[in-house]
Image (cartoon, grey):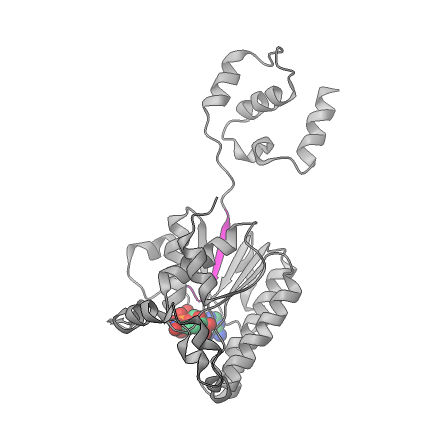
Amino acid sequence: MMKTIISRLLHSQSPPFLKPHCYRDSSLFAARIGRFLSTGSEKVDGSSKLEEAEREEFTPPREKLLVLGGNGFVGSHICIEALAHGLNVSSLSRSGKSSLHDPWANDIVWHQGDLLSPDSLGNALNGVTSVISCVGGFGSNSYMYDINGTANINAIRAASEQGVKRFVYISAADFGLVNYLLKGYFAGKRSTETELLDKFQHGGAILRPGFIHGTRRVGSVHLPLSIIGAPLEMVLRHAKPLTRLPLIGPLFIPPVNVTSVAKVAVRAAVDPAFPSGVVDVYGIRQYSQQNPA
Ligand SMILES: NC(=O)c1ccc[n+]([C@@H]2O[C@H](COP(=O)([O-])OP(=O)(O)OC[C@H]3O[C@@H](n4cnc5c(N)ncnc54)[C@H](OP(=O)(O)O)[C@@H]3O)[C@@H](O)[C@H]2O)c1
């Protein structure tokens, strides 16, 4: 009878503390189960095991995060943020193993692949629970559509087929007239967003920053973009009404720091309570200042 109840509990949507893989010692798991089933006065399997189980820290299963474009400007900050949260992190990009020589890069599993080849994700998705895509770029209109659109759409479809739970896409804010000049870029971004909301109705988050500032590496050179970005962010964050001006309004969208984008992206990737849908630059600022519950 007891065996049947335990077996049912294991195969139901049990709370994490009832999952055997969360315990390093199976006897501690048995003791915890015993306590769960006891009515208070009963003692199961001796009190010493039970006391040991009480002392044992609950270790939640580690989330496995794949960062697409983890060696880029935004992607590398996302990798650092995710490692700081104890996540198991991997990255995929065309160049594969990062050219970054910082110590944190040794804690990432680097995959090589081109998202424009649909099969490219291959093994990189094995066991992955969340994906954050930072893949995008500039060039001719057709290239911009491919890299901001097609490449990410391929990734979303593959992730959805593999049963990935959450997918976060680093998109971009609308820039009015600039949208017209960079048609392929924005058309690609919006096609990816549509696909994401379709395939990840629950667990799909789209971040739409404007200009992202921080320190960008170009080869061995460090570009301190915050010299311009930080003061602009300070001034423009109070100018939201100006963004509604026709044509020039989007020029007043405040820049946002790369660490804020990384913080919100990682939270959106692992927090089941994070809402699906679009987060604009003001939302990114707001979420980045909150401490998750
Ligand atoms: N930086 C900004 O101010 C800003 C503002 C708004 C939105 N965004 C968006 O944020 C995202 C990240 O921007 P970023 O500035 O970090 O760009 P980035 O530094 O150029 O990084 C792009 C990443 O994508 C990878 N990649 C490019 N093509 C690929 C492909 N076909 N397959 C696999 N990986 C590929 C690159 O690595 P490999 O070259 O090794 O493949 C790189 O890791 C982009 O989508 C961008 O549009 C950026």
Residue 65 highlighted magenta (yes or no): yes
Region in magenta: 63-70
Image quadrant occupied by the N terminus = top right
Residue 265 percent location from the top left of the image: 46, 59
Eyeballing the image, is 20 above or below 78?
Answer: above
Q: Is residue 94 visible?
A: no
Residue 2 highlighted magenta (yes or no): no
Q: Residue at x 61, y 24 (%)?
A: 33
Q: Residue at x 65, y 21 (%)?
A: 37
Q: Quadrant of residue 29?
A: top right
Residue 273 percent location from the top left of the image: 56, 49
Q: Quadrant of residue 264?
A: bottom left
Q: Residue at x 29, y 55 (%)?
A: 103
Residue 254 percent location from the top left of the image: 39, 71
Of 129 and 236, which appears nearest the observer? 236
Eyeballing the image, is 168 above or below 151?
Answer: above
Q: Is residue 17 visible?
A: yes
Prevailing secondary structure class for the magenta stretch in the rendered image: strand
**Quarter of the render that holds ligand 1:** bottom left
Relative to 228, 255 lies left or right: right
Eyeballing the image, is 224 above or below 284?
Answer: below
Of 159 and 225, which appears nearest the observer? 225
Of 120 and 134, which appears nearest the observer? 134
